[in-house]
Image (cartoon, grey):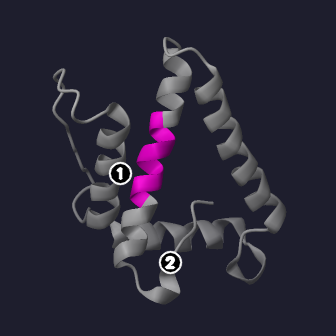
Amino acid sequence: MEKTGWDYLAISTYQGDDPKYTDEIKVYTMGFLEGYLTFKRIWNHYQNCNAFFNYPDGKMPENTKEFLRENRKWIEAMHQNSSSSDPYWAHAWLVYRQYEGLIDAYNSVADSDKKLTVE
């Protein structure tokens, strides 16, 4: 980060046909590991976003949070209602699960006054 201004993190999972770990478990775990390892950077990014968007009192407006909650429900419904052969919705759901893992890990190590919601 200090040399280039960018961080780099590469996490990989076993790519074989082992049915013991589904893709959903793998991506959640990768997100969890990322959140655990980068929680300080996540907090810094959160602070930068609050400053950039100039949220009142440093908090996201409730209507924006509601939109994001509804969007999550919609993505989950599209994933559940699509055929298992639809790669778009399968992948969209996996990206969301990875993000949930990241937030869960972040909150597991962050100070109590720095906890974040998925929104």
User: Could you say which disc has been placed on residue 115 in the image?
Assistant: 2
Decide if residue 41 is in sight here.
no
Q: Is residue 99 magenta?
A: yes
Question: In the rendered structure, which amino acid carries the disc numbered 2?
Answer: Lys
Taking 103 as reference, is 116 left or right? right
Residue 55 pos. (x, y %): 74, 73
Compare residues 38 and 100 and report the one nearer the observer: 100
* Residue nearest the observer in this picture, 5 or 86: 86
Q: Where 43 sits versus 5, above or below?
A: below
| C-alpha separation, residue under disc 2 versus residue under disc 1 | 16 Å
In the image, residue 67 lies at what x, y percent?
A: 78, 51
Seen at 53% across and 20% down, the residue is: 88
Q: Main secondary structure of the magenta part?
A: helix
- Residues packed near mark 2 inside 10 Å, few (<14), some (14 to 19) or many (20 plus): some
Location of the C terminus by quadrant is: bottom right
Mark number, residue 100: none
For the point 47% across and 53% down, the residue is 100
Q: Is residue 115 visible?
A: yes
Point out the image quarter for the N terminus.
bottom left
The residue tagged 1 is 31
Q: Which residues are the magenta region?
A: 94-102
Q: Amino acid at mark 1?
A: Gly
Query: Residue 113, how many percent across, how many down?
Result: 51, 88
Q: Position of residue 89 (x, y in %)?
A: 56, 24
Q: Is 58 covered by the magenta stretch?
A: no
Rendered view: 102 above or below 115: above
Q: Residues within 10 Å of mark 1 (few under 14, many from 20)?
A: many
Query: In the displayed structure, does residue 35 sit left or right of residue 49?
Result: left
Corner quadrant of residue 12: top left
